[in-house]
Amino acid sequence: MNKVAIIMGSKSDFDIMSEAIEILKSFGIKTEHDIVSAHRTPNKMIEYAENAELNGIKVIIAGAGGAAHLPGMVASITSLPVIGVPIKSRNSIDGWDSILSILQMPGGVPVATVALNGSKNAGILAAQIIGSFDSNISQKVKAYKKDLENKVLESSKDLKEKS
């Protein structure tokens, strides 16, 4: 079974990160989620990252605000793909601190980074990664994208009819 882990630095991040859970479930991908703070529970973070693959995880989505070290630290420990979600938190510098902390990783420790508060896109990217080796998931992602296209075409048609 393909499984995606959604981890976050604090409980306050859950509202943002739940969008990843929802989109992954819509693709039929099993998820697990937990609070794993790079700064407050570093031993838990290390253990989680070291055991993720053994626990059936295929992709890790890590959301963090402020200094946002969680995605990069997890990526430094595991060989699994890590997708970082910068979160605009209450102590954030308009989200830029989180974006840059996740985006500016050193060579050899890549973290795919989505937009500020963009966990839905992180979920879609995780599904696309899994779809590269699971044809069932690939077909679901293709259908999702076709549905997006159809919605835009329908909106375009509606707009022209009202003009």
Image (tube, rainbow, N blue to C red):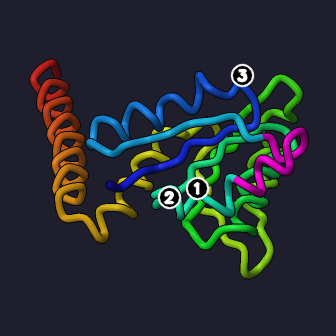
Q: Earlier in the sequence, mark 1 or mark 3?
A: 3
Q: Which of pointers 1 and 2 indicates the residue nearer the eye?
A: 2
Q: Which mark is residue 12?
A: 3
From mark 3 to mark 2, how far is it between C-alphas? Answer: 22 Å
At 68% across and 38% down in the image, what residue appears? 8
Q: Secondary structure at mark 3?
A: helix
Q: Which numbered disc, 1 or 2, marks the residue that appears first in the sequence? A: 2
Quarter occupied by the N terminus: bottom left
Q: CA distance from mark 1 to mark 3?
A: 19 Å
Q: Nearer the viewer, residue 98 or 72?
A: 72
* Nearer to us: label 3 or label 2: 2
Question: Which residue is more in the foreground, 94 or 132?
Answer: 132
Q: Quadrant of residue 80?
A: bottom right
Q: Which residue is mark 1?
A: 83
User: Magenta segment range?
Assistant: 37-47
Q: Amino acid at mark 2?
A: Val
Residue at 23 percent of width and 60 percent of height: 138
User: In this rendering, would 153 be left or right of 73?
Assistant: left
Disc 1 vs disc 3: Cβ atoms closer than 8 Å? Answer: no
What type is the residue that disc 3 sits on?
Answer: Ser
Q: Is 163 part of what is drawn in magenta? A: no
| Residue corresponding to mark 2 | 59
